[in-house]
Image (spheres, rainbow, N blue to C red):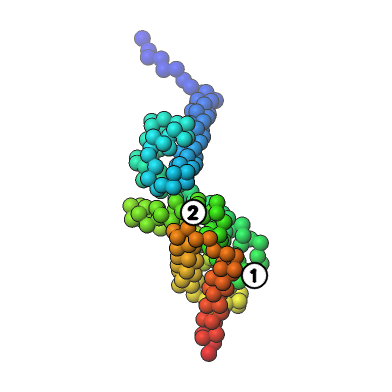
Amino acid sequence: MENVVPAHSDSEISIAERSAQRALAGRYSAYLTEVGALIAAARRVMQRRDSVEPRVSEIVREAGLSNQAFYRHFRSKHELLLAVLTDGYAQLVSYLEQRMAAETRQLGRIRRWLEGIVIQAVQPQAAEAARIFVVNGVRLADQFPQESTRSVEQLKAPLRDALAQAAACGELPGADPVRDTEALYQLAMGWMQQKILARARPSRADVEHIVGFALRGLRAEEVERGA
């Protein structure tokens, strides 16, 4: 007696594959929603309690999820805090890019980037949201160096690009995109973080002063190089 193995047509296999893909896509979408809910919940809990050490139980309760859902996506609370930090950097990068897109000259784009960083300390809501990242940043950078470095580099990238284009088009012909980016980043971020840690609320005039100081430094370098 012959062994009869049912043959599957190409159309039947294709239908099966499509069904599996739909099921996986649905699960992926649901998991993505859970991750987003946990990140948003962690941010709200930390802001409400003014604490960078929220309990997992608080986070899952705030998100309306279970411990099982939490540990399906994160191995520890600190891994979730890294996700909160990374998400915050991504939002800030998007905000900076939108500001810079309104400018046609590279010096204008550089100004917009600097303003976008330091103004985080001026607006109360933005300052409270940024405080989480300021307080957690060093510790998480030590625990997750690669991920932290990647986020910082994404933040620097629009500024470095503007400096490179300013050098290429003659606005800042002697600019050093790598070194100048690092100097401007340290100045703007250090100023903003110090204000947030001190719970100070700088004025718009303070913002204009620090941004103007940075831009004068860039122009002074051009003068020295041309001397």
Residue 134 vs 64, above or below: the answer is: below
User: Which circle's residue, 1 or 2, is located before the other in the chain?
Assistant: 1
Residue at image location 35% in from the left, 40% down from the top: 75
Q: Which mark is residue 105?
A: 1
Residue, far left: 143
Q: Which mark is residue 130?
A: 2
Residue 226 vs 105, above or below: the answer is: below
Crowd class of label 1 (few under 14; some 14 to 19; many from 20; radius 10 Å) = some
Residue at image location 60% in from the left, 77% down from the top: 170
Query: Which is closer to the viewer, label 1 or label 2?
Result: 2
For badge 1, the amino acid type reads Arg
Q: Is residue 167 visible?
A: no
Quarter the N terminus occupies: top left
Alpha carbon separation for disc pair 1 and 2: 29 Å
Q: Which mark is residue 137?
A: none
Give x and y (percent) for residue 56: 38, 37
Q: Secondary structure at mark 2?
A: helix
Residue 56 vs 131, above or below: the answer is: above
Query: Horizontally, is 73 left or right of 119 in the view?
Result: left
Q: Is residue 226 visible?
A: yes
Query: Horizontally, is 178 left or right of 172 in the view?
Result: left
For badge 2, the amino acid type reads Ala
- Closer to us: 174 or 203: 203
Give x and y (percent) for residue 37: 49, 37
- Closer to us: 54 or 140: 54
Q: Secondary structure at mark 1?
A: loop
Crowd class of label 2 (few under 14; some 14 to 19; many from 20; radius 10 Å) = many
Residue at image location 47% in from the left, 69% down from the top: 187
Give x and y (percent) for residue 64: 47, 31
Residue at image location 39% in from the left, 53% down from the top: 136
